[in-house]
């Protein structure tokens, strides 16, 4: 009888799982451990590590360990392939006029979700945060971070070997620590982690941030996902310093030619 | 007589290197099937890596959609060929052709070489594996790893989306296929494949099961750890190295990518999370060594994704990424077989 009860209990538990558990096919969500797995911790689940002390490249390595095109999870969902938007001299450098630059995964994506100005959790479609605030912000309005470009080896600014030396907020304070601080979906603040240029999506939900093309907004402020950073590209500069804002603006999006798989760089160069 | 023998041997060697039905196309003219040969300036988004012809190694590059030949010594590109549909992933080299998994055309395409081996080298499309007509979308959804055994005349393809390993002969006929299931008979997340020609074994890196599908509870998610699985060429499961310490109590890892086997029973594994190369004992599962220094400077590793071991020199070539987009090499670590 005891054995029968035990069997019944197991059966009920099993039934409960079957009823309540999402189907494996629906596993598009991710667990914490998928990003926070400790390489020495014994598999996906045996060890947990914080990412806050890691460099941007190390964090990107976490993302790309699955998003490199090779990983299909047990439920059959293939992680979308992506590459980091960077130019490294001696490595992939091909367009010296842009200098060295690097926009890592979490410069655009926020795996933790974000809080809207009223404290509610906003949509985090494709992990693209809908809004980000500086810690010091009281108006709930996002701020653009922009790269600080300085002279490279030749010591002369404005030449082809210029390098990115840091980031700054619209506050104008170089490496303003609040630039790297934003609120996450769990009520805490994260330094470095959920960084980015919230006003990419300010005032709306992706992709309706205004303008014809959400990737490269052709109207002020030039805050599409792509052109919110660009200051040296041939087209779509955020600071309106040159180029034009019409380059293929009516196409499906910058991604028609500049794919994430290519690190947003044009395949031809 | 000795001189005569020497001449004959030299001629035979030249034949092997430059013609006689091998990977070099007999027709030295440029044909309509030749791919674009504009040399890329550098490796930009390297993925899989394989041995190549004449002191070169081959890399698939997802940025350029190209196969890039890199000099083994200088590690600089020598020639490159852009695939018209641009999705090269897995790659293997044999004397009979270069086998490229193309995720855009969903085929494994076979190419021959034409040219001097320098910048003028061209890749010429020959055929698809599996008797898929040229220009036709195939059924290999995601050929993320390809390996070849020249002696056995077999090509091994891992379709990451279908989670299936298919074995072809060099002419392209399918010999067999199987699902890479581990000791628990579960089919999880295979991400890479390599072969041990000496033991006639197939090595498969598998991420395990990261999801908490039973209860959507992170604390309940200790399902299946990452692992290296070993199969015979025929597809029989032989052995498994698990990342949770259950194979060897000191063996612990989270996710491994590209693999390589040395003749002395070591397995090298690229660890993108740890920015290092782990060296395993094939028979005990013990971690024997950790290779590489984390960083983005030349000679350092960041997000290594694949390996190729030159069994003649013991040099281990690594496709490296993320601020360190290049091919790296650890000289001599593979020892002699």
Image (cartoon, coloured by chain):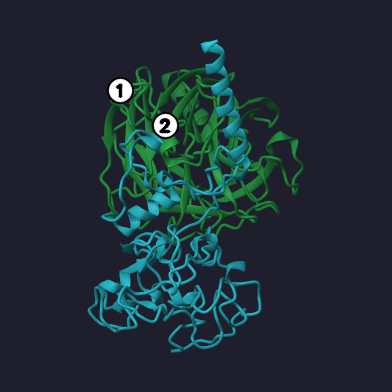
Q: Quadrant of residue B95?
A: top right
Q: Nearer the viewer, residue B14 or A44?
A: A44
Q: Circle 1 — which element?
A: loop
Is B141 on the left or on the right of B38, as rendered? right
Query: Is disc 2 in the same subunit as disc 1?
Result: yes
Question: Residue at (28%, 37%) from the top-left corner?
Answer: B291
Front-lying residue, A45 or A11 = A11
N-terminal of the pair, mark 2 or mark 1, is 1
Residue A214, percent across and down?
A: 57, 75
Extreme residue in the front direction: A1
What residue do we see at 40% from left, 44% from top?
A: A33
Can residue A166 be seen by looking at this rendering? Answer: no
Q: Quadrant of residue B308?
A: top left
Q: Disc 2 or disc 1, which is closer to the eye?
A: 1
Counting every numbered tag in the picture gives: 2
Q: Residues within 10 Å of mark 1 (few under 14, many from 20)?
A: few
Parent chain of label 1: B
Chain painted in green in the figure: B
| Residue B2, placed above or below residue B171 | above
Q: In the drawing, does residue A151 fall left or right of residue B35? A: left
Percent x, y of residue B203: 48, 27
**Chain at numbered mark 2:** B
Look at the numbered discs 2 and 1 and tell me whether their residues touch, using CB distance below 8 Å. Answer: no
The cyan-tinted chain is: A
Q: Residue A87: where, in percent of width, then height? A: 39, 65
Circle 2: is it few (<14), some (14-19), or many (20+) Cα within 10 Å?
Answer: many
Quadrant where the image shows the N terminus of chain B = top left
Q: CA distance from mark 2 to mark 1?
A: 23 Å
The residue that disc 2 covers is B260
Secondary structure beneath dot 2 equals: strand
Question: Which residue is the site of mark 1?
Answer: B249
């Amino acid at each position: 009888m005891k054995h029968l009860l035990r069997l019944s209990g197991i059966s009920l538990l099993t039934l409960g799982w079957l009823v309540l558990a999402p189907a494996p096919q629906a596993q598009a969500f991710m667990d914490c451990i998928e990003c926070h797995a400790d390489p020495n911790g014994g598999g996906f689940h045996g060890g947990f590590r914080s990412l806050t002390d890691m460099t941007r490249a190390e964090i990107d390595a976490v993302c790309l360990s699955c998003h490199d095109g090779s990983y299909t999870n047990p439920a059959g969902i293939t992680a979308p392939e992506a590459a980091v938007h960077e130019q490294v001299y001696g490595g992939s450098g091909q367009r010296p006029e842009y200098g060295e630059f690097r926009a890592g995964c979490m410069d655009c994506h926020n795996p933790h979700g974000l809080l809207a100005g009223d404290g509610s959790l906003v949509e985090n479609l494709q992990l693209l945060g809908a809004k980000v605030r500086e810690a010091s912000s009281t108006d709930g309005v996002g701020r653009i971070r922009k790269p600080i470009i300085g002279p490279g080896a030749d010591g002369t600014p404005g030449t082809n070997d210029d390098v990115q030396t840091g980031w700054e907020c619209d506050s104008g304070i170089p490496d303003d620590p609040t630039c790297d601080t934003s609120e996450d979906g769990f009520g805490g603040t994260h330094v470095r982690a959920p960084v980015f240029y919230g006003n990419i999506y300010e005032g709306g939900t992706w992709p309706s941030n205004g303008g014809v093309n959400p990737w490269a907004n052709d109207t002020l402020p030039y805050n599409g996902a792509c052109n919110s950073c660009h200051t040296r590209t041939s087209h779509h500069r955020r600071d309106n310093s040159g180029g034009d804002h019409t380059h293929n603006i009516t196409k499906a999006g910058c991604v028609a030619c500049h794919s994430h798989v290519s690190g947003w760089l044009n395949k031809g160069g | 007589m000795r001189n005569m023998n020497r001449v004959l041997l030299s001629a035979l060697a030249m034949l092997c290197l430059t013609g006689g039905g091998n990977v070099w196309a007999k027709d030295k003219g440029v044909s309509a099937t030749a791919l674009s040969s504009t040399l890329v300036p550098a490796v930009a988004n390297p993925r899989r890596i394989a041995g190549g012809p004449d002191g070169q190694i081959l890399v698939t590059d997802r940025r350029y959609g190209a196969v890039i030949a890199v000099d083994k010594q200088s590690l600089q590109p020598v020639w490159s060929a852009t695939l018209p549909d641009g999705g090269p992933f897995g790659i293997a080299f044999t004397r009979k052709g270069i086998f490229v998994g193309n995720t855009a055309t969903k085929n494994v395409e076979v190419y021959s070489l034409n040219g001097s081996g320098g910048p003028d080298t061209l890749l010429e499309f020959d055929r698809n594996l599996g008797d898929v007509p040229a220009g036709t979308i195939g059924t290999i959804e995601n050929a993320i790893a390809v390996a070849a055994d020249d002696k056995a005349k077999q090509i091994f393809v891992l379709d990451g989306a279908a989670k299936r390993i298919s074995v072809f002969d060099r002419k392209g006929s399918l010999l067999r296929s199987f699902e890479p299931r581990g000791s628990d008979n579960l089919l999880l997340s295979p991400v890479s494949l390599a072969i041990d020609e000496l033991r006639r074994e197939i090595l498969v890196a598998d991420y395990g099961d990261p999801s908490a599908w039973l209860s959507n509870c992170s604390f309940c998610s200790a399902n299946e750890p990452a692992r290296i699985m070993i199969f015979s060429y025929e597809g029989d499961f032989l052995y498994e190295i698990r990342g949770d310490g259950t194979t060897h109590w000191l063996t612990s890892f989270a996710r491994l990518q590209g693999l390589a086997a040395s003749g002395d029973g070591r397995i090298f594994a690229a660890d993108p999370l740890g920015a290092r190369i782990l060296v395993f004992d094939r028979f005990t599962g013990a971690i024997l060594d950790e290779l590489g220094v984390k960083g983005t400077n030349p000679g350092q590793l960041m997000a290594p994704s694949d390996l190729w071991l030159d069994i003649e020199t013991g040099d281990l070539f690594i496709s490296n990424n993320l601020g360190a987009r290049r091919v790296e090499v650890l000289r001599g670590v593979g020892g002699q077989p």
